[in-house]
Structure formats: structure tokens, C-alpha cells
Amino acid sequence: MKQAVFLLAHGAPERVEDVPEYLKFVRSGRPVSAQLIEEISHRYAAIGGVSPLRQWTQVQAEALEKRLGIPVFYGMRNWHPFIRETMDRIRDSGAERLAAICLAPQYSKMSVGFYFRRTQEAKVDAGASAEIVWAKSYHDSPLLIEAFAERVAFAEKVAFAEKLRPLATGRKVLFTAHSLPEKALAEGDPYERECRATAALVGAAAGVADWDFAFQSQGMTEDRWLGPTVESTLDRYAAEGIREVVLHPIGFVCDHVEVLFDVDMLFKRYAAERGIALLRPESLNGSAKYTEALAEVAQRALRTSSETA
């Protein structure tokens, strides 16, 4: 049986000029205000006008294909190559069983579940016949945890010129993941639980006892979004006399605007204004350990036979 892997990512504009069109997809056709277009355009301009999301997704796909020895495709929910565009290539490849993996380790029906629904729709629309097997969540994958922990340990060693040790007074590790509207957790959605579980496992693997967790990048809507926010956590640290923070996003697997702008610009400036030096470890990006994690997830999925998501 011919097998393949399909990596699913959010997608991002590759030019500032693409932001208005991109936001139409993000908002599923709902009206996009001029204010939102201006703000998001500003953020992409600030990181150089180009998101590296597609570049890193391609790097991850190519590394995984080399590791597994089977075709690995990737598609985006909100930008080129769209999931539907990639499904044509999958159909033409003759793949009979397809492991679909969202490049977001923690599952929520509102996020990862939506990617899977789009994939199933694209399969029908393209007339593809491959059986799709879903890798719903890998938030506690030992290899993923090792990959994140390696980044924390390296950042500590390089930035503070010492081997990793229990954190001294005045220093904290703050793990983050992308916030979702609180309504996303209705009916027992596991997202918040899985995010906090990933943070706890990474903290333990890196030998960090003194860590916190916060949600970042809350949306610009009137919904109530999951917290605590990074900003409120930094306020608390400042009041407690914390002067060094290692902020490590464990809900993202590569650089993109929520890392390069939200963390590297907004949060670093916010922290500095409160007398806090904020360090972000390198994203997983081309991590060999992350490739191994994806390989294990794909191989496990391909041993199953369910298309439910």
C-alpha cells in the first residue's frame, strides 16, 4: 500500500501586500476592517515583510520525507499552497493511505479539528481516494518534549554563561501557547489541558522547577480569550522582583509572526519597560529531534485506520 504524510499549517502571507487577501481566508469571508488590515500589515512589515512559516514548513516536510522514505506533502489552511491545492498533488501521486498531521502539537476542535475538516472536504472535492488517518494530538510525545527541552537548556547555557541549574531568585521560565476564545473549551475540549501538560513535561525534562504558563496572541475580537496573558504575567514578575525571563512558546513549532513580532518585539519591549530582560529560545524550526518526533507520530498514525476527527 502506497503511504504518504500530509503536514497541515496555518499559512501566512509572504508579502505585506497580500495581507488583505490573507485576512479574508483567516476570517472565513467575514468582513475585515481597515483597522485590522493596517495593524496586521504593520506587524508583517516589522518582521521584514515576509513570514518564514512556509519556508520552515517546507524544511520540516523535506526532512521528514528523507527520514521516512515516503512522500511528505504540506498544505496551508489560509494561504498558498492551500490544503485543496495540495490535495490535487496527493491524488495524482497515487497515495492510498495518508497520515494527516497538524503542525500544532495540542488538539482543539476549533483549531486542529478545523484543519482536519478542511482536509476531508478537499479530499472529496479533489476526487482523491486515499484513506486519511489523523494524528490528532502529540502534545506529550517524548521526542517533542526532548526537542523543546533542548532549546530551553541551550538558551540558558548560552545567554547566562552557565550550565543549566535550578533557577536562581530573580529568574523565571515562562511557557506559552496561542490563546483561543474561551468558548472553544466548551464540551470538554482538551486544548488548555494539553498546553499545560506540554509545559509541565518540558519543564521537567529541562530540569526547570520554577516555571509558569501563559496564553499569548489573543485575537482582536470581542470574545473572551484564554488567559492568563503574557502581559499580566510580566506585570506580576515585575512586582515580585523578577529580572530575567526565558519565554518559550511550546504551542508553536517554527518561526512566524506570533513569534517574531509578538514575542521578539512586543513582549521584549513590554518586559524591558518593567526592568525585565526577556530571552526567547530558538524555535524548533529545523530541529532534528522534532523531525524524529514527527516521524514517530506519522508511523503511529499509519498503523491506524480511522478517518474520524
Image (cartoon, grey):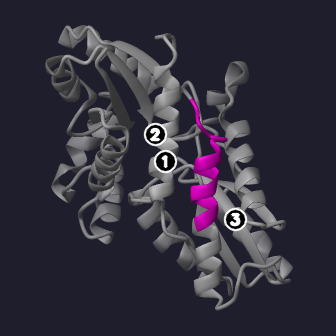
For the residues bearing labels 2 and 1, Cβ distance under 8 angstroms: yes
User: Where residue 215 sits: x, y (%)?
Assistant: 64, 52
- Magenta stretch holds residue 161: no
Q: Mark 2 to mark 1: distance in Å?
A: 5 Å
Q: Mark 1 to mark 3: distance in Å?
A: 25 Å
Q: Amino acid at mark 1?
A: Glu
* Secondary structure under the numbered disc 2 in the rendered image: helix
- Magenta stretch holds residue 143: yes
263, above or below 268, in the image: above
How many neighbours does mark 3 have within 10 angstroms: few (below 14), some (14-19), or many (20 or more)? many
Magenta region = 137-150
Quick check: can you spot residue 135? Answer: no
Disc 2: which residue: 295
Disc 1: which residue: 292
Disc 3: which residue: 174
Q: Amino acid at mark 2?
A: Ala
Q: Amino acid at mark 3?
A: Leu
